[in-house]
Image (cartoon, rainbow, N blue to C red):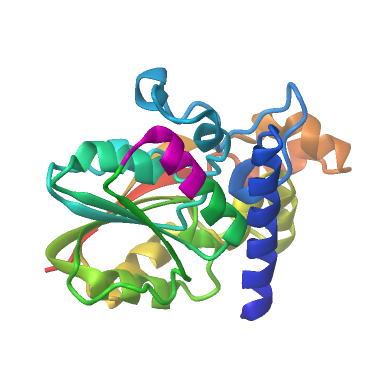
Amino acid sequence: MPEIKEVVKEKYGQAALRVLSGVGSGCCGGKAAPIGAVDPITANLYDEHQTSGLPAEAVLASLGCGNPTALAELKPGEVVLDLGSGGGIDVLLSAKRVGPTGKAYGLDMTDEMLALARENQAKSGVANVEFLKGEIESVPLPDNSLDVIISNCVINLSADKDRVLREAFRVLRPGGRLAVSDVVVRGAIPPDIRRSIELWVGCLAGALEENDYQAKLRAAGFTDVSIEPTRVYHVAEAREFLSGHGIDVDKIAPLVDERFYSGFIRARKP
């Protein structure tokens, strides 16, 4: 669905331009949250030890929902790809972990984000990095060329997740692994209620139900599939925001509380 891609591309492009002008952004390329507002998705994902030595713009441009580089257990010499690499923070962190004998690729379809990422790479002085322009549904790399694929709150934005996962499977080497952070839904949510919550966190718009996510991974050929919740979202965190949009928080809370979460999704190519 090209219209979805265009909307995502525009949001990420605007987010990159805001970072270049010194303003942070909300989750998934959304508008920057007002001071004092709670962003339950992007807050406190990286500690100071991890971000030391990285350009401030790389940290500001982090629009993810997890920290896949910390959870992926990257090893020296591995070749890793970040799907939807944005400002490049996870690529730069990955490059440090795989070391000079390894390599980290970033893939993004947004010119502004690619420009920001390459600028951040130049500032950081990390050499074993390459940013590619393209879509996560059609990865511009050969079959069996990667050890690890990471991603940070991006797969949920694709209108064709099955194709994304098939492409991930294609470019991984046998024994390679998928290690991504994404927003996941636990159980069915009434459509009108889901739309209300999406007002709060735009990342939820395309989030898969956890069993559906695992089924799609297996259909793409992956084994050893698992989802580990890393941050569960509570409606209480959004009470002020949702109430301001005329939503009865007490009424919807039992239907949605703890039903959306950031998850770390693992899978392996046999």
**Residue 225 in sight here:** no
Residue ID at (50%, 37%): 58
Task: Name the quarter where the N terminus is drawn.
Answer: bottom right
x and y, in percent, of residue 61 in the image: 56, 40
Residue ID at (63%, 79%): 2
- Give, as a single range, the part of the protein colored magenta: 118-126
Q: Which one is in front, 6 or 188? A: 6
Q: Which one is in front, 269 or 185? A: 269
In the displayed structure, 178 sits above or below 173; it is: above
Compared across the picture, whether 161 is left or right of 15 comes to left
x and y, in percent, of residue 253 in the image: 67, 39
Task: Name the quarter where the C terminus is drawn.
Answer: bottom left
Q: Which one is in front, 270 or 108? A: 108
x and y, in percent, of residue 7 in the image: 69, 66
Compared across the picture, whether 263 is left or right of 257 comes to left
**Residue 171 in sight here:** yes
Q: Residue 125 in magenta?
A: yes
In the displayed structure, 106 sits above or below 269; it is: above
Q: Residue 72 in magenta?
A: no
x and y, in percent, of residue 63 in the image: 55, 43
